[in-house]
Amino acid sequence: MASFYSTQSYTITDLRAFEPLPEALRSTSLVIRVLCFLALGRPNLDDHWRSLQSEQAFETVRSRLCSILTSTITMVSVLLTISSVFLSTGSPVSYFDYTSPVPYCLLFISLMFTMITMLTSGSSMIHWLHANHHWTQEQLKQGDYFVLSYLLSIVTPIVFVVCSLNCFIFAIMIAGFSSQSTTCRAVTALWLVAYAVNVGTILMEVMWKYVSITLEIGSSF
């Protein structure tokens, strides 16, 4: 999935106050690099570390993250409402039965993901509203587990809302393809094609961006 965060570099006006990236944050595993890319738009912490050098740059990062979390909470609230309606009511038409075992199970899983997303988004929002750049720097300096938990607090809400949305989509698709109505199956097939094209486009864009940034970083050394 494409990152929602800016990849711009931050300029520190007072060079004496600039603190170089700690050694513990230079050598990172593949998992950390992937999480960095998903959360920050870069496969390393260099640019993000620069943003922690000034309060103004950190405020820019925090406002973007809070805006994304607000959008995530809004989206998951809609999904929660829709999933609850589907789970609590039967199909109004006989040719589209989403109460059969597989679609119903996927709808239930989607509902569970939305609840988890509400919890993680809310906790992340509280974390960022009370965070400051000095405290965040000290957390990242610890390395390992602290870096992993920091990145997961950014990525987890988005991952869960994507999982919830996909479970809901597959539940409706399975119900559509199981329908006795030819029209319903045809519409579901068109929906599947549109879904595959969109997901494929997003994945190609993400891979292209990751490779481009990795090559750019490699050529700078």
Image (cartoon, helix red, strand yellow):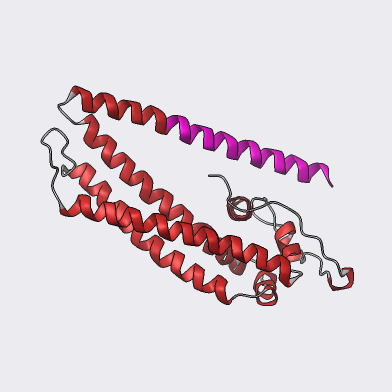
Percent coordinates x, y for residue 87 in the rendering = 20, 52
Residue appearing at x 47%, y 57% in the figure: 71
Answer whether residue 40 is visible to the viewer in this image: yes
Residue appearing at x 59%, y 36% in the figure: 205
Residue furthest to the right: 16
Examine the image and state in which quarter residue 168 appears. top left
**Part of the protein shown in magenta:** 196-221
Say if 165 sits above or below 142 in the image.
above
Q: Main secondary structure of the magenta part?
A: helix
Viewer-nearest residue: 32 or 98: 98
Residue furthest to the left: 94
Question: Viewed as shown, does residue 66 lie left or right of 19?
Answer: left
Percent coordinates x, y for residue 215 in the rendering = 75, 40
Say if 44 sits above or below 132 in the image.
above
Examine the image and state in which quarter residue 147 appears. bottom right
Question: Viewed as shown, does residue 80 lie left or right of 101?
Answer: right
Percent coordinates x, y for residue 32 in the rendering = 61, 56
Percent coordinates x, y for residue 21 in the rendering = 77, 64
Residue appearing at x 69%, y 54% in the figure: 44
Q: Is residue 65 one of those drawn in magenta?
A: no
Residue appearing at x 43%, y 31% in the figure: 196
Q: Is residue 209 one of those drawn in magenta?
A: yes
